């Protein structure tokens, strides 16, 4: 079996502390630390991530094609670990003495590729609809599935959607825009 590469931690380049409140009101310190990106022999770059104080500790190397990507992925990985933790999901995680109620309160980046992809697809549909182009029924259903998956992923990390009126369903979107056009 090939040995798994572990980057040296080097100097701590990023650190954040949280508090995990237990049911009996005791506070345990949760620490996220990211080490200096390092060249991986014969390959890319690695960046070590250490997270302690959660129900599951982490000490892992993440990889990128260069030091910037390795560091960026280390930050996103940290965000995913913290927002997937039992402490966060049960509402016991605090940042700066304030409960972390949503993924945004954790103040770590999360991977947005799925959100970006969904927005690009939605933008494509909107452009075609504005141009009067008929959108394939199956393709529309696929876009809605992607948007639902993104919503489900964000909700699993206790993201709360913005309040306000909900956009019209795709079935009624054309009718809603025609009605607006008649009233203006």
Image (tube, rainbow, N blue to C red):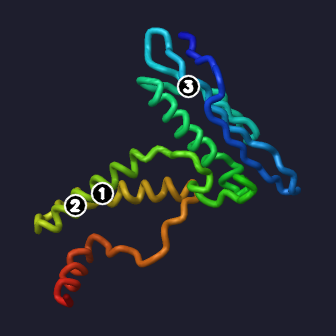
- Percent coordinates x, y for residue 150 in the rendering: 43, 54
Please tell me which residue lies in front, 13 or 173. Answer: 13
- Percent coordinates x, y for residue 124 in the rendering: 22, 57
CA distance separating discs 3 and 1: 35 Å
Please tell me which residue lies in front, 99 or 85. Answer: 99
CA distance separating discs 2 and 1: 9 Å
Residue linked to disc 1: 143
Left-right relation of 120 to 95: left
Element class at badge 1 = helix
First reached walking from the N terminus: tag 3 or tag 1:
3
First reached walking from the N terminus: tag 2 or tag 1:
2
Circles 2 and 1 in contact, beta carbons < 8 Å: yes
Circles 3 and 1 in contact, beta carbons < 8 Å: no
At x 65%, y 28%, the residue is: 12
Residue linked to disc 3: 47
Please tell me which residue lies in front, 1 or 103. Answer: 103
Quarter holding the C terminus is bottom left
Left-right relation of 106 to 181: right
At x 33%, y 49%, the residue is: 117
Q: Nearer the viewer, mark 3 or mark 1?
A: 3
Rendered position, 68 above or below 89: above
- Percent coordinates x, y for residue 160 in the rendering: 54, 64
At x 49%, y 66%, the residue is: 161
- Are there few (<14), some (14-19), or many (20+) residues within 10 Å of tag 1? some
Left-right relation of 167 to 176: right
- Are there few (<14), some (14-19), or many (20+) residues within 10 Å of tag 2? many
- Are there few (<14), some (14-19), or many (20+) residues within 10 Å of tag 3? many
CA distance separating discs 2 and 3: 39 Å
At x 43%, y 23%, the residue is: 66
Rendered position, 94 above or below 80: below
Element class at badge 3 = strand
Q: Nearer the viewer, mark 2 or mark 1?
A: 2
């Amino acid at each position: 079996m090939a040995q798994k590469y572990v980057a040296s931690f080097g100097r701590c380049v990023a650190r954040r502390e949280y508090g995990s409140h237990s049911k009996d009101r005791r506070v345990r310190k949760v620490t996220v630390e990211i080490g200096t990106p390092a060249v991986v022999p014969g390959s890319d770059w690695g960046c070590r991530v250490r997270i302690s104080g959660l129900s599951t500790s982490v000490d892992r190397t993440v990889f990128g094609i260069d030091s910037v990507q390795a560091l960026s992925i280390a930050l996103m990985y940290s965000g995913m670990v913290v927002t997937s933790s039992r402490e966060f999901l049960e509402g016991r995680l605090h940042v700066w003495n304030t409960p972390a109620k949503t993924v945004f309160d954790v103040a770590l980046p999360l991977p947005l590729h799925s959100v970006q992809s969904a927005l690009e697809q939605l933008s494509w549909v909107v452009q075609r609809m504005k141009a009067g182009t008929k959108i394939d029924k199956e393709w529309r259903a696929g876009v809605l599935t992607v948007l639902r998956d993104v919503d489900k992923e964000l909700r699993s990390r206790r993201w709360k959607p913005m309040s306000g009126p909900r956009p019209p369903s795709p079935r009624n979107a054309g009718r809603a825009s025609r009605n607006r056009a008649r009233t203006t």
